[in-house]
Image (cartoon, coloured by chain):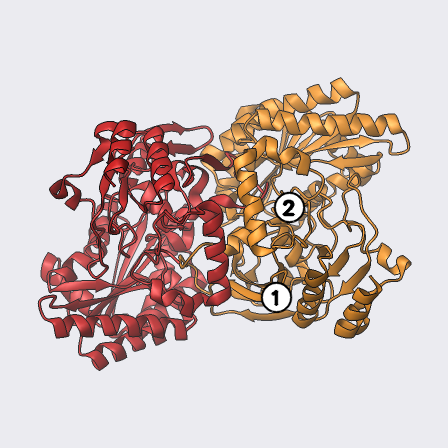
Chain colours: A orange, B red
Amino acid sequence: MDRLLLELRAAVGDAVVTDLDRMLAYRRDQCLLARDGEPLAVVRARTVDDVVATLTIANRSRVPVVTRGAGTGLAGGANALDGCIVLALDRMNTILGIDTESRTATVEPGVINGDLAAAAAEHGLWYVPDPGSRAISSIGGNLATNAGGTCCAKYGVTADHVSRIKAVLADGRIVHTGSDTRKNVAGLNLTQLLVGSEGTLAVIVEATVRLRSLPASASTVVAMFPDAARAIDAVLAIRQVADPCLLEFMDRTTVSAVENMTRMGLDVGAGALLLVQCDGRDAGVEAAQCADACRRAGATEIYRTTDPREGDEFMQARRVALTALERQGSTLLDDLAVPVPQLPRMLSEIDRVAALHDVRIGTFGHAADGNLHPTVVFDAADPAAVARARAAFDDLVAACLSLGGSISGEHGIGSLKVGHLEDMIGTTQRELMAGIKAVFDPRGILNPGRGY
Amino acid sequence: MDRLLLELRAAVGDAVVTDLDRMLAYRRDQCLLARDGEPLAVVRARTVDDVVATLTIANRSRVPVVTRGAGTGLAGGANALDGCIVLALDRMNTILGIDTESRTATVEPGVINGDLAAAAAEHGLWYVPDPGSRAISSIGGNLATNAGGTCCAKYGVTADHVSRIKAVLADGRIVHTGSDTRKNVAGLNLTQLLVGSEGTLAVIVEATVRLRSLPASASTVVAMFPDAARAIDAVLAIRQVADPCLLEFMDRTTVSAVENMTRMGLDVGAGALLLVQCDGRDAGVEAAQCADACRRAGATEIYRTTDPREGDEFMQARRVALTALERQGSTLLDDLAVPVPQLPRMLSEIDRVAALHDVRIGTFGHAADGNLHPTVVFDAADPAAVARARAAFDDLVAACLSLGGSISGEHGIGSLKVGHLEDMIGTTQRELMAGIKAVFDPRGILNPGRGY
């Protein structure tokens, strides 16, 4: 392996890190229970040439490469493997251009989502995808996991906003996919194949994403319900009358954790909270209709505002949900999606699983697209509690599948859920995916064992 | 080959057609200049079992299979190959279910787009993708080509509305891709790989598509411009202030062909026409802003209406564009997409090519996403005219590429543009596509030579 390090140093110079202490920061993403290994080296690539050189050398020696954006992943997909090269793209963080006429931005993969959004906003434009991690996660990672966010039900996920990708294949060849045009049906859709491939097919080194006009400021509705079932009734009713840009759910446990942390005055006696925002030309009227739907579904308290600052404060309550739960213990965050009409049953299943394994689960998520984040709160110092947390996690995944759901709505499979994937997609799909991987990466060096 | 027919007959009975006259109707799509061959047999499948049996037999004997929906394709992708089996899915045309709570429809591939839209509308729901062929084209064909339509810029293309696909692989295995959930990042996105694959990877036998609430009726603006450049100025200005659900362009040649046919009173002296529709809660105000943008860009005549019937009449003028041009000769319809800011240059290129080859070209298309259909009108009985038409067609494709465009926005590559594809996507992408094809279809029986 010494020869490999020499080759790497000759090719990319001091971009190579081998110091164990310095490598520590590049070993893990933010998934607590996924294993990590000890990397041979970290390459902090500065250029496409660095990426090409690293992959060429790794491929020749059949050394695994784990590509890493900002390390904010939640499924262990960027955790180091023993003896791997961690290819870190955090230094490739230049916004290469914003084209106000075409309404696109071209970026390096390490650009932070929020930085792109801010740069676009200076031109009156909007980079839509808004994962909860947007202040700290990178576009490359967002693409690799096909990150979601709060505005997906109305505006789509990361995949829906990308038009072109430049990527480096395992053997160092560069491939350009997609087109600058809104519509393009020339050949197979390799762009959509790369999005969500979790570092297993190629390394994305540049992307062109679509921008929209900034929306008019949103109208916000917050509604408290005596129980989760009535909150979901309201979700179903809202979908009949409106197309909110945000429709978020928090259960009793989450509401009380958030209130404990923020002291913002949420009713900790409530069984569930819905946060609704409508944007567009007639946001106020649309929000009023959403409020009516909440009232008819049995909301006990409804607050409506068109003040963007107040709206942001409520949004902040939702954004800190995970942080608030983390204050109560270690957390194992799940990411399950069910068809919206199955939400009541999924919430009942979560209650059942919590009781069965005697664990505490706080649930919040994107109600409009059925994407919930049941979060097991446990004591990581107690092995029995860890075992119960894991068992609960597995049962939640199984319950989701039994309701026709997806085992990942927006975080990805990573290493955390590889064992569950075949239960969802079956053998034939998995074989096809393995075949596609072999086409892109015949030696299997790119994030092996992750994603599928 | 007699053995093969015996096997087919034993497996699928009278679904097999070998009579030359009866096969004639299954030999070609609607692309005039693409070649067709003489099929060995047509199988008019009634069930998934028929498809499985046909593919299993064909794969064993390495006989090519050309899958066919309604035969309305415009790129020769469904034209028979010599000695192939044409697998016709027109009889698999059952709407299997409309789920009003999940807001999805599950259909067989032969269901006509317009029939699905009508069935959804009975429940107050909307199947959005609206290719010009919607009254006669099938969902399977729409998926195979990733068909566009007039409302793409606001609502996306066929690919954006599909959630699940059931398909039969070349060896007869059945694969289910996607999920019933709005968000799903479990494994590689095989659904988006199948969409637009033009019958080369698998045979789609069932699809679940997403439905929306029916929009409020649209407000319509029709504007006449002295020249195409000013019409495109208006398009760029409209995109700054509004998000129309329809923004269609017709050039002078097309306007006058339509007026000749319809006598609806269009100004044949105008250089270009824009047809704009806005839907949603504030459609009237949005349409007024579009009209203002047209006026400022130099429109000579602007007509605005909120009457849906009047709107439909104008829409009809756009819908008959190709038919109107066909009355003036044989047509070679192109399908080019450029970034919207490049539209003026693309229109200049079309004029240049028309002059260079002494051909008549009528251009219409979806201005909001830069997708134009320059249509060469020629005398098919005159070999010199045919040669000039083809030369013009090739030059248009080259001009589009030089402007950073895509050689197909919504019709597909089929057989018509296979020779142009590598100029656009390069060798590496093409090799990856060929590799993926070999994973799905190792013996290369599915529509060989088409698509990529």
Which residue is at a point 75% across and 40% down the rendered structure image? A322
- Count of numbered labels shown in the rendering: 2
Residue B327 lies, in percent from the top left, at 11, 60
Residue B212 lies, in percent from the top left, at 42, 39
Which residue is at a point 21% across and 62% down the rendered structure image? B33
Give the residue pinned by disc 1: A107
Q: Is residue A316 above or below residue B322?
A: above
The reply to whether the C-beta atoms of the residues labelled 2 and 1 are less than 8 Å apart is no
Q: Is residue B28 left or right of residue A434?
A: left
Viewer-closest of A324 and B45: B45
Residue A354 lies, in percent from the top left, at 74, 22
Q: Nearer the viewer, mark 2 or mark 1?
A: 1
Disc assigned to residue B217: none
Viewer-closest of B258 and B350: B350
Residue B318 placement: quadrant = bottom left
Give the residue pinned by disc 2: A311
Residue B284 lies, in percent from the top left, at 35, 51
Q: Is residue A274 left or right of residue A216?
A: right
Q: Secondary structure at mark 1?
A: strand
10 Å crowding of disc 1: few (<14), some (14-19), many (20+): many
Residue A230 shows in this picture: no
* Kind of residue indicated by mark 2: Gly
Q: Is residue A373 above or below residue A230?
A: below
Q: Is residue B24 above or below residue B424?
A: above
> Of the residues under marks 2 and 1, which one precedes in the sequence?
1
Residue B400 placement: quadrant = bottom left
Q: Is residue B277 left or right of residue A428?
A: left
Q: Secondary structure at mark 2?
A: helix
Which residue is at a point 80% across and 54% down the rendered structure image? A83
* Kind of residue indicated by mark 1: Val
- The chain ID associated with circle 1 is A
Q: Quadrant of the C terminus of chain B?
A: bottom left
